[in-house]
Structures are given as C-alpha cells and as structure tokens.
C-alpha cells in the first residue's frame, strides 16, 4: 500500500540519539524503527525530541541504501551517531503545537501501516478529489482560491486536485487531516461524508491564517512573517557550526523564492559562511584521514601485514575517503622508496 505519491519516505537516515544510547547502554540490539524512515516523522515518539539527520562527526547525511550501513553508526565516517550535537531541528524551541503534531503524526502513521496488511488499498485521484471538493464547499462556500490560501498552495493546484488531474502530496493530506481533526485513513480512502466548517487545530510552526480574503486584513500577517523570517536569518549568521541556507529556509516554513526575493543579501552571506565552513572541515577531514591511514599503515607493516584497503578497513575509519586513498598511496611509495634506498 502506498499512502500517497510523494513526501512519504525520506531518502536520508534519521535517528534519536537518546534511543540509540539507551539501547547501547542496556546491551540491546541496535535497529532503526520503521517510523524513523518516514519523512513526516520529525520527533521521537518515546522521548518527544527532534530526530537527527546529520552525523555529529563528518556533518553529512546518510542515505537509506548506503553501502556498509550499520545501525547506530555513520555510513560515511563509521563513527557513533548518538553523540550530543545540534542538528536541523535540535536547537528549535518546540511549542505545544509542535509536540502535539509530532505525537499525532507518529500515532496516525502507525495506524496506517498497521491497517495496510489487513485491508490494502491505494488512494485514487477520484476519491481524493471528492474529499477536496467536500472541503471547499463546506469550509469556504466553494471558493477554491480561499481554500488555497488556507492550505498555503496555489489556487491552480487546488483546481487540479478538485478535477482529479493531480493528487495532493502526502504532507498536504497529512496536514489537512490534522487541522480538520478527521481520520487520515478515511481521507486516503475518499470515504468521508462530512468535514468541519473550519480548522480545529493550528498547524505547527506557522502563523494562524484567517479566512478573510481581504487584502487589508492579510497585510499585518505578511509583515509579521517578514519580521520573523528576518530574525531567523540573522540568528543563523551567529550559529556555530554555520547552517546551510537550505536548513535555515526550512526553519522559516516559507518557500525558497519568497526568502531569496526579500532577503537576497543575507541569504548570500549565510551561503558564503557555510561554504567557508565546509572548506575548513574538508581540510580538517583530509588531514585527519591522512594521519590516521598513515599511522595504521605503518603499524600494520610493523606487524608484517600487507598495506591494503581490506586490511586497513579494520584499523581506519577513513579508508573509503579519497583522502585516505591518497594517504595510503603515499605510504606505499615511501615504503618502496625506502626499500630501494632512494
């Protein structure tokens, strides 16, 4: 069963450091729960803390299908993932709405996954279109543009949903189900016969949107968003380590074109700062790889073991990095040169 097209399964690994450390301390098997692989899940259901997405050592993401993947360890640098670190969401102050949303997402997605083996189904565009039309008629008296503003999407997109020409991506359906307080399974099956006249819950990390279509009433909200976005961007300039511009934009809950159009200078400053940081980290990683591979190679040579990648793989976490390859080649050349007396 595929709940909806797009936005369901994340491509990079996510994990809860507290869960991993607890399992390791109690000598329990390390594993990655299925919920961690689902893109809408951003909080640990047990600890109610944001999941992490970046390795605390190499500051890179781990692909779900990366080779040599080992639960609890980075597939790139092979280090333990559950170190104390700030991540994309870790340093955000979670509101009650954020926690309520995170708990609800984990619960409802668990229900969807549990229902799949018993009654498999695939949402159809026709069924979803019936629900969207019901929402438009019930909530805004058939005004598709007003409904588009409530959903924070373009009105042409809503028109395509209504006609079945396109199907909303899973995050949009998930948010609609949460804000209306309706069953996600019924929404996916297209079996709803009634919906509330207005949203019953606020969406987390977003300012509440009024239902009035008056431009005069929408302008204060737009100014408030602009101030909030500017504060977020300015705070990012003082963060250590520097975040990428993509990470900062995700925190604002706005689309990238809006951010770049109104704050181009500060966006470029954030991007330059992150690029400089990446260059410094690349040098540090290169030097660390060279030093570790060189040390491991000479130690193995003293033991009479060949200096090959397979043998070094048990001694160095940087064998698979290009820097590690270069260091190993230099060691081999030095050994050959020494044996010839050059």
Image (spheres, rainbow, N blue to C red):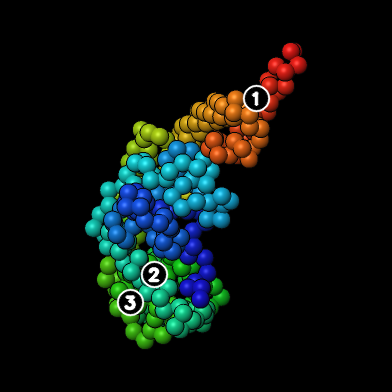
Q: Mark 3 points at which residue?
A: 182
In whole angstroms, how far apart are the C-alphas of marks 1 and 2? Answer: 52 Å
Q: What residue do we see at 56% from left, 50% from top?
A: 68
User: Residue 292, located in which quarter of the rendered image?
Assistant: top right
Residue 260's place in the image compared with 37, above or below, is above
User: Residue 237, located in which quarter of the rendered image?
Assistant: top left
Q: Name the residue under label 2.
A: 109
Nearest the eye: 280 or 232: 280
Q: Earlier in the sequence, mark 1 or mark 2?
A: 2
Q: Mark 1 points at which residue?
A: 331
Residue 237's place in the image compared with 198, above or below, is above
- Residue 64 pos. (x, y %): 52, 55
Q: Residues within 10 Å of mark 1 (few under 14, many from 20)?
A: some
Q: What residue do we see at 49% from left, 81% from top?
A: 121
CB atoms of marks 3 and 1 within 8 Å? no
Residue occupying the far left of the picture: 96
Q: What residue do we see at 51% from left, 40% from top?
A: 77
**Front position among marks 3 and 1:** 1
| Residue 341 seen in render | yes
Q: Which of marks 3 and 2 is nearer the N terminus?
A: 2
| Residue 321 seen in render | no
Element marked by disc 1: helix
Element marked by disc 2: helix
């Amino acid at each position: 069963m595929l709940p909806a097209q797009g936005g369901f399964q994340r491509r990079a690994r996510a994990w809860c450091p507290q869960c991993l450390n607890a399992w390791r301390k109690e000598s329990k098997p390390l594993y990655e729960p299925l919920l961690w692989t689902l893109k809408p899940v951003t909080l640990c259901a047990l600890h109610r803390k944001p999941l992490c997405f970046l390795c605390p050592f190499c500051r890179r993401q781990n692909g779900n299908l990366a080779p040599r993947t080992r639960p609890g360890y980075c597939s790139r640098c092979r280090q333990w993932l559950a170190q104390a670190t700030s991540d994309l969401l870790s340093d955000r102050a979670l509101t009650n709405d954020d926690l309520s949303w995170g708990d609800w997402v984990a619960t409802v997605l668990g229900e969807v996954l549990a229902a799949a083996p018993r009654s498999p189904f695939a949402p159809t565009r026709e069924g979803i279109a019936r629900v969207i039309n019901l929402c438009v008629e019930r909530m805004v008296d058939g005004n598709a543009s007003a409904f588009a503003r409530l959903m924070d999407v373009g009105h042409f997109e809503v028109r395509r949903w209504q006609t079945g020409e396109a199907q909303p991506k899973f995050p949009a359906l998930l948010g609609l189900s949460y804000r209306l307080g309706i069953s996600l399974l019924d929404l996916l099956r297209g079996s709803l016969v009634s919906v509330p006249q207005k949203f019953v819950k606020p969406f987390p990390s977003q300012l509440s949107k009024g239902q009035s279509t008056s431009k005069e009433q929408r302008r204060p909200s737009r100014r408030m968003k602009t101030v909030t976005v500017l504060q977020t961007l300015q705070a990012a300039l003082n963060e250590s380590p520097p975040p990428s511009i993509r990470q900062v934009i995700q925190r604002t809950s706005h689309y990238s074109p809006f951010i770049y159009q109104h704050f181009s200078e500060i966006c470029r400053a954030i991007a330059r700062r992150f690029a400089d940081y990446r260059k410094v980290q690349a040098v540090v990683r290169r030097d660390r790889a060279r030093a570790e591979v060189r040390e491991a190679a000479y130690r193995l040579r003293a033991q009479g073991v060949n200096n090959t990648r397979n043998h070094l793989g048990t001694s160095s976490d940087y064998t698979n990095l290009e820097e590690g390859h270069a260091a190993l080649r230099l060691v081999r050349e030095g050994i050959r040169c020494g044996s010839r007396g050059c």
